C-alpha cells in the first residue's frame, strides 16, 4: 500500500506515483539531451551520485525495520512466512 493512503485509495495513490515517475523521467531525459552529450553525461552522473548519497543518508537501515524489531508490520499484521529455500 502507498504510505499515507487508505486501503480504498491505494490504487489511486499507486497510479499517481507511477505517473509522476514517468513524467519526471521524460522531463529529466529531455533536460539532459538539451545539455549535449558531454554535459548530459556529466549531469546524469552527478544526479546518480547525489541520489546514492541521499539513499544512504535518508533511508533507515533494514535492521531497524518493523519486521526485525517487533515481528509485526506497521499495520499490526504478522510477519509473512519465509520463502522456501531450494
Image (cartoon, rainbow, N blue to C red):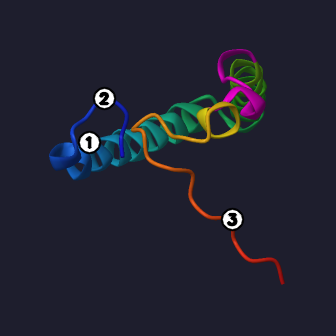
Query: Which numbered tag is attached to residue 55?
Result: none
Which sits earlier in the primary sequence, circle 3 or circle 1?
A: 1
* Foreground residue among 54 and 1: 1
Label 1 – label 2 distance at C-alpha: 9 Å
How far from the left and from the top, in percent, is residue 14? 32, 47
Label 2 – label 3 distance at C-alpha: 27 Å
The C terminus lies in which quarter of the figure? bottom right
Which sits earlier in the primary sequence, circle 2 or circle 3?
A: 2
Is mark 3 in CB contact (under 8 Å) with mark 1?
no
Asked if the magenta segment contains residue 30, the reply would be no
How far from the left and from the top, in percent, is residue 78? 50, 50
Place residue 71 in its image quadrant: top right
Is mark 1 in CB contact (under 8 Å) with mark 2?
yes
10 Å neighbourhood of mark 2: few (<14), some, or many (≥20)? few
Place residue 9 in its image quadrant: top left
Query: Residue visible at 70% across and 32% down?
Result: 44
Residue extending farthest to the top is: 57
* Foreground residue among 71 and 47: 71
Please give the residue where the numbered disc 2 appears in the rendered image. Answer: 4
Q: Secondary structure at mark 3?
A: loop
Please give the residue where the numbered disc 1 appears in the rendered image. Answer: 13
10 Å neighbourhood of mark 3: few (<14), some, or many (≥20)? few
How far from the left and from the top, in percent, is residue 18? 37, 48
Which sits earlier in the primary sequence, circle 1 or circle 2?
A: 2
Amino acid at each position: 500500500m502507498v504510505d499515507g493512503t487508505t486501503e480504498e485509495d491505494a490504487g489511486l495513490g499507486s497510479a499517481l506515483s507511477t505517473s509522476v515517475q514517468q513524467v519526471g523521467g521524460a522531463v529529466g531525459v529531455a533536460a539532459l539531451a538539451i545539455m549535449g552529450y558531454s554535459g548530459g553525461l556529466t549531469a546524469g552522473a552527478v544526479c546518480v551520485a547525489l541520489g546514492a548519497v541521499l539513499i544512504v543518508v535518508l533511508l533507515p537501515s533494514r535492521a531497524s525495520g518493523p519486521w526485525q524489531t517487533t515481528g509485526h508490520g506497521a499495520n499490526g499484521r504478522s510477519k509473512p512466512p519465509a520463502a522456501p529455500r531450494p
